[in-house]
Amino acid sequence: MSLGRTGSTFLTSHFQNYLYNKKSKVYNAHEFFRFWPMHFYKHIHFLKAHNLEIPKSFVDFMCNLVKFTEASGKQKETWEWVAPANRPYGRRNINLLNNRKKKDGYYIHDEWPYSLNMIDDFCEQLNKVQGLEYFIHKHIGRISEDFGDEWAYENVIAKADLVIVNYRYNVLDTFISLQKAIQSQEWVAIGNYKPEYDNKIEWNKKYFIDYATNRYMASYNKVKEALKTTQKPYFVIQYENFVANVNKRQYLADLLAQSGTIKTSEIDNLLTLLRPRIIKQSKPRQFYEDCFNAQGVKKFKEDYHDIKHLTTYTY
């Protein structure tokens, strides 16, 4: 369980993945319900490659991406692509795109195309693959916030045998990281640093306060309540502590062992031996204001006293 820009991709990359190593016992889906729906097709292709059944819920998902209208009288049958092609799903993006109307004339499907039971259906098929014993994926809190009761944190957590809560202590750093990613459209760095990610960004006090209180802190507080309700085993990883740890593999191994849900002898089958290729996207900076444009620096310095109490969060 995590929010975006908290190091969740880096964390999940420390787990093995059957897609890259057929001796692995782990299907590491990373973000199973991707905001970019085309990325979900790798799971569909996995089922096809292993001669497994394509569940009805997956067919429904594919139908949600394309609107089909049957022929009627002189009206020919039509197909329309109704999912975001180059932008992530999300209530703001969908509303924005529909208000503008896409240049090529189609509107965006206004519902999340997935259903939560797709996890059950997929794992049922994974059970047919010899040697696969673990399914790992990360759930981004924005899904639960944007797409209704089906995706309530309690319902998502109820699907898990073990929950890892991943969060970032520094809320302001998380906010800055999000703004940089939105501006640069660089969401992950694999192998090489991309300077455009560190271009100067604007500062908006009102936007930060709303993000910190109504999105970041509120979401993790809901996760806390959901874990109490479901009584699922869990442990917490703070991004800053994880990144600072020299032996990240052992750090994870110890937490998995302490959870009591996984045999110690099985932990080596979960964690990768190789260092992930994912790197930190930004270069080190001395002061927060180094991230903002000239106008933003002035505003940030004026606003900092008012927002200081919101800049950190402890789960």
Image: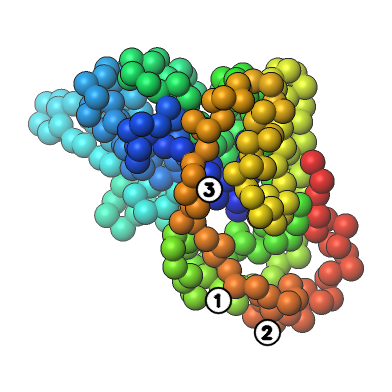
* Residue 258 - label: none
Classed neighbour count for the residue bearing mark 1: other residues with Cα under 10 Å, few (<14), some (14–19), many (≥20): few
Badge nearest the viewer, 1 or 3: 3
Q: How many marks?
A: 3
Residue matched to label 3: 9
Say which residue appears at 27% left-offset and 54% top-offset.
Answer: 104
Say which residue appears at 64% left-offset and 20% top-offset.
Answer: 261
Which three-letter amino acid code belongs to the residue tagged 2?
Ala
Residue matched to label 1: 199
What colour scheme has been applied to the protein in the rendered image?
Answer: rainbow
CA gap between label 1 and label 3 equals: 22 Å
289 versus 153 height, above or below = below
Residue 283 locus on image (x, y percent): 60, 73
Which element carries disc 1, helix, strand or loop?
Answer: loop
Q: Quadrant for the C terminus, please.
A: top right
Q: Work out whether mark 2 precedes mark 3 in sequence or the reverse, and give the earlier one.
A: 3
Q: Kindly indicate the quadrant of the structure image that contains residue 205.
A: bottom right
Using the rendered image of the protein, determine whether residue 142 is visible from the camera's viewpoint: no
Residue matched to label 2: 294
CA gap between label 2 and label 3 equals: 32 Å
Which element carries disc 3, helix, strand or loop?
Answer: helix
Say which residue appears at 71% left-offset and 67% top-offset.
Answer: 204
Q: Work out whether mark 1 precedes mark 3 in sequence or the reverse, and give the earlier one.
A: 3
